[in-house]
């Protein structure tokens, strides 16, 4: 259901009384009660899909037109058409597609919003998080926790594009959004991140980590590792059970970030999932395959590279349109924040539709 605007005017009251309230920055609750506390969950965000085939040439043109020195971060923001230019993909989440060209480097900074990056295309780039070099390959997930210095570099020969996900709208809602001035990117202090070094097997963690205790022991999840785990899970799981893996802090099993979660889903050839809805907003990136998703009343067809959004409390149902190959979806969401605030809820239909 779409949200409606609140009003401070009660037309049954004398206009002089309403003007006296407004002059003193006072509003009657009864005119806005059911907007502030609606009887069902509402959002202005709409289901929407951004086609990679359409966005990719716009990113290439941005790379031609805008110097990285001028842009600092060369990003095209995915703006939800229901949020009227809010630079947000849901009411709490931001998403954008960033492009880095061979030989470029994006300067270093840190900020209060948390960020994650899912590589869409290209090889040769890297992200440095607190001095740790994280190689960027298609499907890799990298997080940059709040107030951690990070920059991007490119040692390869082809453009690299990744999906940026941040909690900027949520943090701005607290009036807590802030970023440091940019400074030149520095050479990484280490060429290996913990995912390649210390976290190479499920259920195993080093007794004495060699990395600084930052509170974020793992910042990169390579797609080759995640895909292998998904394929293994799919091979043994019952056909009616979904194949989904969450990205977690390997030392605690909890969410790596306090405000955003992420997961990867494997859709078997021809698989159609049961419809489910959550109080979390979800942003999907198609890593492999083609299919369609029913989000609320909208049917969104997708293929590799596409991005689409499921606003909160919309029924979501995925279908792999291929009868021979799997499809893989990555998604990030605001589930950790909702759980922390006691606002998390989900429903699952008893059978697929």
Image: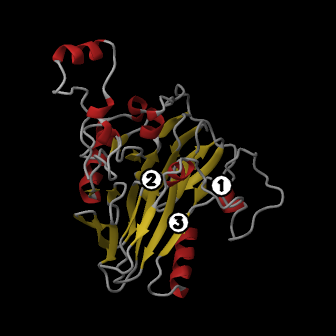
Q: Residues within 10 Å of mark 3 (few under 14, many from 20)?
A: some
Asked if residue 243 shows in the view, the reply is: yes
Q: Is residue 96 left or right of residue 131?
A: left
Q: Earlier in the sequence, mark 2 or mark 1?
A: 2
Label 2: which secondary element: loop
Looking at the image, is mark 3 or mark 2 earlier in the sequence? 2
* Separation (CA) of disc 1 from disc 3: 14 Å
Task: Please state the horizontal and vertical placement of residue 189, each as a whole percent of the image.
Answer: 69, 43
State the residue in front, 43 or 45. Answer: 43
Identify the residue at horizontal 21%, vertical 26% (top origin).
Answer: 9
Between label 1 and label 3, give the one nearer the viewer: 1
Q: Which residue is mark 2?
A: 157
Q: Earlier in the sequence, mark 1 or mark 3?
A: 1
Q: Which residue is mark 1?
A: 218
Residue 64 on image: x %, y %: 30, 40
Secondary-structure class at tag 1? loop
Quarter of the image holding residue 180?
A: top right
Q: Residues within 10 Å of mark 2 (few under 14, many from 20)?
A: few
The C terminus sits in image quarter? bottom left
Tell me what residue is drawn at x 29 percent, y 16 percent. 21
Q: Residue at x 57, y 75 (%)?
A: 229
Q: Give the total number of marks visible in the rendering.
A: 3
In the rendered structure, the answer to whether residue 276 lies left or right of residue 124 reads left
Residue 242 image offset from top left, x and y in percent: 46, 77
Q: CA distance from mark 3 to mark 2?
A: 21 Å
**For the residue carrying disc 1, how many other residues have a C-alpha within 10 Å: few (<14), some (14-19), or many (20+)?**
many
Residue that appears at 52% across and 28% down: 182
- SS state under label 3: helix
Note whether 316 is above or below 249 in the view shown. Answer: below
Question: Where 75 sits versus 203, above or below?
Answer: above
Q: Which residue is mark 3?
A: 223
């Amino acid at each position: 259901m779409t949200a409606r605007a609140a009003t401070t005017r009660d037309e049954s009251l004398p206009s002089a009384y309403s003007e006296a309230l407004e002059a003193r920055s006072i509003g009657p609750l009864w005119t806005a009660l059911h907007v502030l506390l609606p009887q069902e969950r509402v959002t202005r965000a709409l289901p929407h899909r951004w086609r990679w085939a359409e966005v990719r040439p716009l990113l290439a043109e941005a790379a031609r037109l805008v110097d990285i020195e001028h842009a600092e971060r060369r990003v095209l923001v995915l703006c939800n058409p229901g949020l009227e230019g809010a630079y947000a993909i849901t009411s709490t989440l931001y998403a954008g597609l960033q492009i880095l060209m061979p030989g470029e480097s994006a300067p270093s900074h840190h900020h209060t919003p948390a960020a994650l990056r899912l590589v869409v295309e290209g090889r040769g780039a890297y992200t440095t998080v607190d001095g740790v070099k994280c190689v960027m390959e298609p499907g890799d997930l990298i997080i940059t926790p709040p107030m951690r210095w990070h920059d991007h570099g490119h040692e390869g020969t082809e453009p690299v594009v990744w999906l940026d996900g941040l909690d900027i709208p949520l943090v701005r809602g607290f009036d807590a959004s802030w970023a440091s001035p940019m400074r030149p990117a520095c050479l990484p202090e280490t060429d290996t991140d913990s995912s390649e070094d210390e976290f190479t097997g499920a259920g195993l963690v080093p007794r004495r980590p060699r990395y600084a205790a930052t509170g974020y022991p793992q910042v990169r999840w390579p797609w080759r590792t995640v895909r292998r785990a998904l394929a293994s899970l799919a091979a043994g799981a019952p056909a009616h059970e979904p194949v989904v893996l969450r990205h977690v802090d390997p030392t605690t099993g909890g969410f790596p970030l306090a405000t955003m979660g992420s997961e990867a889903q494997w859709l078997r050839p021809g698989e159609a999932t049961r419809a489910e809805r959550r109080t979390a907003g979800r942003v999907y990136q198609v890593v492999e395959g083609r299919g369609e998703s029913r989000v609320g009343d909208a049917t969104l067809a997708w293929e590799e590279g596409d991005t689409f959004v499921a606003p909160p409390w919309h029924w979501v149902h995925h279908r792999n349109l291929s009868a021979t190959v799997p499809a893989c979806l990555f998604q990030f969401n605001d589930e950790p924040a909702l759980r922390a605030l006691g606002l998390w809820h989900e429903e699952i239909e008893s059978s697929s539709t």
